[in-house]
Amino acid sequence: MRGLSRIAIAGFALAGIAGCADLTTSPPQATSRAFVPREGPSLDYYGSSRFSGFRTTRFTLTSAGGWFDIGDVYTLRVPANAVCVLDSNYGEDAWDQPCTTIADGDSIRITATYGFVGSGPVVDFWPDLRFDPNKTVTLSTDVFASTLTGYRDYFEANPDKLQYFGIYYSRDFGTTRVADAALDSSLRTHIDLRSGRVWRRVKHFSGYSQTSGKACEPSPDDPDCIALPEPIIESSIRR
């Protein structure tokens, strides 16, 4: 049965957004700025968006698509005619299959549950559904914008450190993570060091989350550390 069981986890990255107008955003005002060895920033987040527990928000998907703010943590962008009908095939073998999209006048009510796990944000969507693989649906966050922009020179000089900002898919609110971008390069994280926005493509609902991004060595003993293709660094964000 589908439900709030699959969540994607973002280290510090989100889905790609294609063909949109440029947007200038104001980054959050407060994140920690403690240093770690080699003068790199601490990636723990203590900004004004941080809260304990989980919250829910609801929105409606139609054939028109749209922009949907999930609290002040995530933003979902859905192009027109992108949402597959709920009885479409669903599962790892179905993400790239053609589908019938919801018709004009039809709608699907979505519940998003979001919050923070460890030192990063997480979101889960219900009901589970997938998107037309010919459309690019994206999920983005500005939660770590002040860290990324404030230490832009550091990250430009050490781009390998940005791999810890990746968004992952998870079945259990971040307890375990799947580096789906390792198998599908279109799901790689994008990071704009000028705006601080992190984003990635999503081909289906259930959930996504963002981890602390601390440097680590991938190991079965450390579920918070997963090897992921290096994020794509953007020169200007497109929303």
Image (cartoon, grey):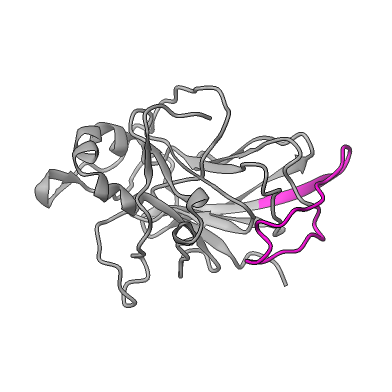
Residue pictured at 47% horizontal, 41% vertical: 141
Q: Which residues are magenta?
A: 85-111
Q: Nearer the viewer, residue 186 or 13?
A: 186
Q: Position of residue 142 (x, y in %)?
A: 43, 37
Image quadrant occupied by the N terminus: bottom right
Numbered marks: total: 0
Q: Position of residue 17 (x, y in %)?
A: 54, 36
Is 61 a magenta residue? no
User: Is 78 left, or right, of 235 in this rendering?
Assistant: right
Q: Quadrant of residue 70?
A: top right
Q: Nearer the viewer, residue 236 or 50?
A: 236
Q: Quadrant of residue 223?
A: bottom left
User: Is 119 left, or right, of 128 in this rendering?
Assistant: left
User: Is 102 left, or right, of 130 in this rendering?
Assistant: right
Q: Does the magenta stretch mainly form a helix, a strand or a loop?
A: loop
Q: Position of residue 51 (x, y in %)?
A: 44, 49
Residue pictured at 10% horizontal, 48% vertical: 38
Is 105 a magenta residue? yes
Q: Residue furthest bottom?
A: 221
Q: Residue furthest right?
A: 105
Q: Work out whether 106 lies above or below 194.
A: below
Q: Position of residue 179 (x, y in %)?
A: 45, 62
